[in-house]
Image (tube, grey):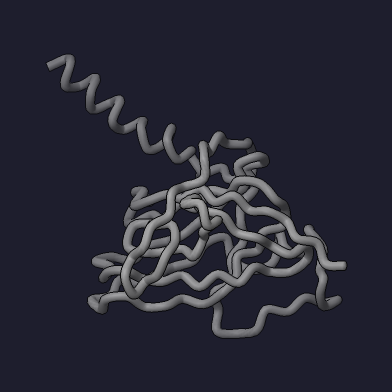
Amino acid sequence: MRALALCLALAALVPAVAFGNRSAVGTTAAACGSPSRVGSFGKAGRGAELGPLVLPFNDGAGRAAKIYVTGFPTRVVIRGRMARRSDLTLRGYNCDSGQPLRFWYRNEPLTFPLGFPTTEEELQHKGDLSVKFPATKKLGGTHSGYMLFWTAGDWRLVLSGRGRATVGSVVVRVSEESVQ
């Protein structure tokens, strides 16, 4: 009986250790590990699998990677690869600093007061801290929008369901391309 209680206690800790306790996002850095592997998912395309979603991150060598242009939002089209039984929420953070990633998946244009390129500070404060994906019985679906990366490095994206239970996690290596 004591062994069962110990196993249950350890099982409860695994998600917090593996994916980081992000309730205090932005306060500490988190070890993320290597960039995730990518695969092919039929009509959803090639990319990193995140539960029922596919993110188009691919370095051509089988790992999740994305290039961002300094001072510009990064267009990321998220594709569904299967129906979703419940609402899901996507959050992200920088592996070096622990700072949260911002998203812009709204039905309105993304603008900045001084235009483009914009500042790191603007990219760190514009948009939303999460993206909601409603439950659907349909297969697939496309979600067009932006991830507001402001620095190169590894980023973890975590998809959660009810009660913040982790559905999946992806590490993507973001590299910088400067505008001349």
Residue 92 on image: x %, y %: 54, 53
Q: Is residue 96 left or right of residue 140?
A: right
Can you name the residue that lies furthest to the left here?
A: 1
Q: Is residue 55 above or below residue 138?
A: above
Residue 144 on image: x %, y %: 51, 77
Residue at (81, 68) in percent of width and height: 118
Q: Is residue 8 left or right of residue 119?
A: left
Q: Nearer the viewer, residue 104 or 152?
A: 152
Q: Is residue 92 above or below residue 2?
A: below
Q: Is residue 145 left or right of residue 90?
A: right
Q: Nearer the viewer, residue 174 or 166?
A: 174
For the N terminus, the image quarter is top left
Can you name the residue that lies furthest to the top here?
A: 2
Residue at (36, 70) in percent of width and height: 80
Q: Is residue 112 above or below residue 10?
A: below
Residue at (63, 53) in percent of width and height: 174
Q: Nearer the viewer, residue 3 or 145?
A: 145
Q: Is residue 98 left or right of residue 71?
A: left
Residue 170 on image: x %, y %: 46, 50
